[in-house]
Protein backbone atom coordinates (compact mmCIF):
# COMPACT_ATOMS: atom_id res chain seq x y z
CA UNK A 1 0.00 0.00 0.00
CA UNK A 2 1.28 3.45 -0.85
CA UNK A 3 0.53 7.12 -0.25
CA UNK A 4 0.65 9.24 -3.44
CA UNK A 5 4.12 10.80 -3.73
CA UNK A 6 2.70 14.29 -4.33
CA UNK A 7 1.30 14.29 -0.77
CA UNK A 8 4.66 13.60 0.86
CA UNK A 9 6.95 16.32 2.13
CA UNK A 10 10.52 16.31 3.39
CA UNK A 11 10.82 14.97 6.96
CA UNK A 12 14.42 16.18 7.20
CA UNK A 13 13.16 19.79 7.22
CA UNK A 14 11.00 19.27 10.33
CA UNK A 15 12.12 20.63 13.70
CA UNK A 16 11.81 17.70 16.10
CA UNK A 17 11.67 18.10 19.89
CA UNK A 18 14.28 16.64 22.23
CA UNK A 19 14.33 12.88 22.67
CA UNK A 20 12.06 11.47 25.37
CA UNK A 21 12.37 8.05 26.87
CA UNK A 22 9.96 5.20 26.18
CA UNK A 23 6.71 5.94 28.07
CA UNK A 24 6.32 2.57 29.80
CA UNK A 25 8.93 1.90 32.49
CA UNK A 26 7.66 -1.66 32.93
CA UNK A 27 8.45 -2.42 29.28
CA UNK A 28 11.96 -0.93 29.54
CA UNK A 29 12.63 -3.03 32.66
CA UNK A 30 11.53 -6.13 30.73
CA UNK A 31 13.82 -5.24 27.80
CA UNK A 32 16.78 -4.74 30.10
CA UNK A 33 16.08 -8.02 31.91
CA UNK A 34 16.49 -9.94 28.65
CA UNK A 35 19.67 -8.12 27.62
CA UNK A 36 18.52 -5.06 25.67
CA UNK A 37 20.83 -2.55 27.34
CA UNK A 38 20.75 0.46 24.99
CA UNK A 39 21.16 4.16 25.58
CA UNK A 40 18.24 5.12 23.33
CA UNK A 41 14.98 3.18 23.04
CA UNK A 42 13.18 5.99 21.23
CA UNK A 43 13.88 8.59 18.60
CA UNK A 44 12.52 12.10 18.22
CA UNK A 45 8.73 12.29 18.09
CA UNK A 46 6.67 15.28 16.97
CA UNK A 47 2.96 14.92 17.74
CA UNK A 48 0.25 16.60 15.68
CA UNK A 49 -0.94 18.74 18.60
CA UNK A 50 2.53 20.31 18.82
CA UNK A 51 2.29 21.46 15.18
CA UNK A 52 3.26 19.42 12.14
CA UNK A 53 3.74 20.51 8.51
CA UNK A 54 0.62 20.76 6.34
CA UNK A 55 1.70 17.82 4.18
CA UNK A 56 1.43 15.55 7.25
CA UNK A 57 -2.22 16.53 7.67
CA UNK A 58 -2.81 15.83 3.96
CA UNK A 59 -1.35 12.31 4.32
CA UNK A 60 -3.52 11.69 7.38
CA UNK A 61 -6.65 12.88 5.57
CA UNK A 62 -5.87 10.66 2.56
CA UNK A 63 -5.45 7.54 4.72
CA UNK A 64 -8.45 8.27 6.94
CA UNK A 65 -10.65 8.62 3.86
CA UNK A 66 -9.17 5.58 2.11
CA UNK A 67 -9.68 3.28 5.11
CA UNK A 68 -12.88 4.88 6.47
CA UNK A 69 -11.36 5.73 9.86
CA UNK A 70 -12.22 8.35 12.46
CA UNK A 71 -10.66 10.37 15.28
CA UNK A 72 -7.23 10.12 13.70
CA UNK A 73 -4.12 11.67 15.18
CA UNK A 74 -0.58 11.58 13.89
CA UNK A 75 3.02 11.96 14.86
CA UNK A 76 6.18 12.03 12.80
CA UNK A 77 9.23 10.21 14.01
CA UNK A 78 12.94 10.64 13.40
CA UNK A 79 14.85 7.50 14.43
CA UNK A 80 18.57 8.36 14.45
CA UNK A 81 21.27 5.69 14.10
CA UNK A 82 21.74 3.68 17.29
CA UNK A 83 18.09 3.74 18.28
CA UNK A 84 16.60 0.32 19.03
CA UNK A 85 13.06 -0.32 20.20
CA UNK A 86 12.72 -4.05 21.01
CA UNK A 87 9.44 -5.89 20.62
CA UNK A 88 6.55 -4.12 22.31
CA UNK A 89 2.79 -3.74 22.09
CA UNK A 90 1.11 -0.37 22.05
CA UNK A 91 -1.81 -0.08 24.48
CA UNK A 92 -2.97 3.46 23.58
CA UNK A 93 -4.18 4.47 27.08
CA UNK A 94 -4.55 8.19 26.26
CA UNK A 95 -6.19 7.55 22.89
CA UNK A 96 -8.65 5.05 24.41
CA UNK A 97 -9.57 7.53 27.14
CA UNK A 98 -9.97 10.50 24.79
CA UNK A 99 -12.26 8.58 22.43
CA UNK A 100 -14.06 6.42 24.99
CA UNK A 101 -12.90 3.14 23.46
CA UNK A 102 -12.99 -0.04 25.50
CA UNK A 103 -11.39 -2.54 23.09
CA UNK A 104 -7.87 -2.36 21.68
CA UNK A 105 -9.03 -4.24 18.55
CA UNK A 106 -10.98 -1.14 17.48
CA UNK A 107 -7.78 0.88 17.26
CA UNK A 108 -5.78 0.95 14.05
CA UNK A 109 -2.14 2.03 13.64
CA UNK A 110 -0.79 3.04 10.25
CA UNK A 111 2.97 3.44 9.80
CA UNK A 112 4.04 5.43 6.73
CA UNK A 113 7.69 5.25 5.68
CA UNK A 114 8.85 8.80 4.92
CA UNK A 115 12.18 7.90 3.34
CA UNK A 116 13.45 4.98 1.28
CA UNK A 117 14.85 1.99 3.14
CA UNK A 118 18.59 2.01 3.73
CA UNK A 119 20.87 -0.65 5.15
CA UNK A 120 20.38 -0.92 8.92
CA UNK A 121 16.80 0.37 8.92
CA UNK A 122 14.48 -2.31 10.29
CA UNK A 123 10.85 -2.77 11.16
CA UNK A 124 8.92 -5.88 12.12
CA UNK A 125 5.22 -6.34 12.80
CA UNK A 126 3.61 -9.53 14.09
CA UNK A 127 6.92 -11.41 13.58
CA UNK A 128 7.12 -10.37 9.89
CA UNK A 129 10.23 -8.37 8.88
CA UNK A 130 9.71 -5.27 6.76
CA UNK A 131 12.70 -4.01 4.74
CA UNK A 132 13.37 -2.59 1.27
CA UNK A 133 10.47 -0.14 1.53
CA UNK A 134 10.21 2.98 -0.58
CA UNK A 135 9.05 6.41 0.55
CA UNK A 136 5.26 6.49 0.85
CA UNK A 137 4.70 2.78 1.49
CA UNK A 138 2.66 2.05 4.58
CA UNK A 139 1.50 -0.84 6.73
CA UNK A 140 -1.43 -1.18 9.10
CA UNK A 141 -2.21 -3.27 12.14
CA UNK A 142 -4.79 -3.37 14.89
CA UNK A 143 -4.77 -3.41 18.65
CA UNK A 144 -1.75 -4.56 20.57
CA UNK A 145 0.05 -6.33 17.70
CA UNK A 146 3.73 -6.83 18.61
CA UNK A 147 6.26 -4.81 16.63
CA UNK A 148 9.96 -3.85 16.60
CA UNK A 149 11.79 -0.83 15.20
CA UNK A 150 15.51 -0.23 14.91
CA UNK A 151 18.09 1.87 13.20
CA UNK A 152 21.48 0.21 13.23
CA UNK A 153 22.45 1.97 10.01
CA UNK A 154 24.20 5.27 9.42
CA UNK A 155 21.31 7.54 8.33
CA UNK A 156 18.12 8.73 10.01
CA UNK A 157 14.94 6.67 9.48
CA UNK A 158 11.71 8.71 9.19
CA UNK A 159 8.14 7.50 9.67
CA UNK A 160 4.66 8.83 10.34
CA UNK A 161 2.34 7.11 12.80
CA UNK A 162 -1.39 7.52 12.48
CA UNK A 163 -3.68 6.23 15.19
CA UNK A 164 -7.41 5.97 14.47
CA UNK A 165 -10.41 3.67 14.86
CA UNK A 166 -13.35 2.39 12.81
Image (cartoon, helix red, strand yellow):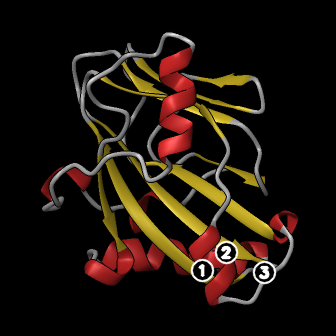
Residue 65 vertical position relative to residue 4 in the rendered view, above or below: below
- Quarter occupied by the C terminus: bottom right
Residue density around tag 1, few if under 14, some if 14–19, many if 20 or more, within 10 Å:
some
Q: Position of residue 100 (x, y in %)?
A: 74, 89
Identified at 46% across, 16% down, the residue is 36
Measured from the top left, where is residue 64 in percent x and y? 66, 78
The mark found on residue 164 in the picture is: 2
> Residue sitting at 86 percent across and 63 percent down?
105
The residue located at (37%, 33%) in the rendering is 41
Report helix, strand or loop for mark 2: strand
Q: Earlier in the sequence, mark 3 or mark 2?
A: 3
Read off the residue under disc 3: 68
The alpha-carbon separation of the residues under discs 3 and 2 comes to 10 Å
Q: Earlier in the sequence, mark 1 or mark 2?
A: 1
As drawn, the label of residue 72 is 1
Is residue 127 at least partly visible in the picture? yes
Above or below residue 62? Residue 4 is above
Quadrant of residue 157 within the rendered picture: top left
Amino acid sequence: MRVPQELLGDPTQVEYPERRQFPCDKTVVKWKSIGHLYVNYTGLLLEEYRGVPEWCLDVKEYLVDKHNLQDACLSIYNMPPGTIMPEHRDTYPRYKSLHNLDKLEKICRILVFLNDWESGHYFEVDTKPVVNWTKGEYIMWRGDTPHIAANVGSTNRYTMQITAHD
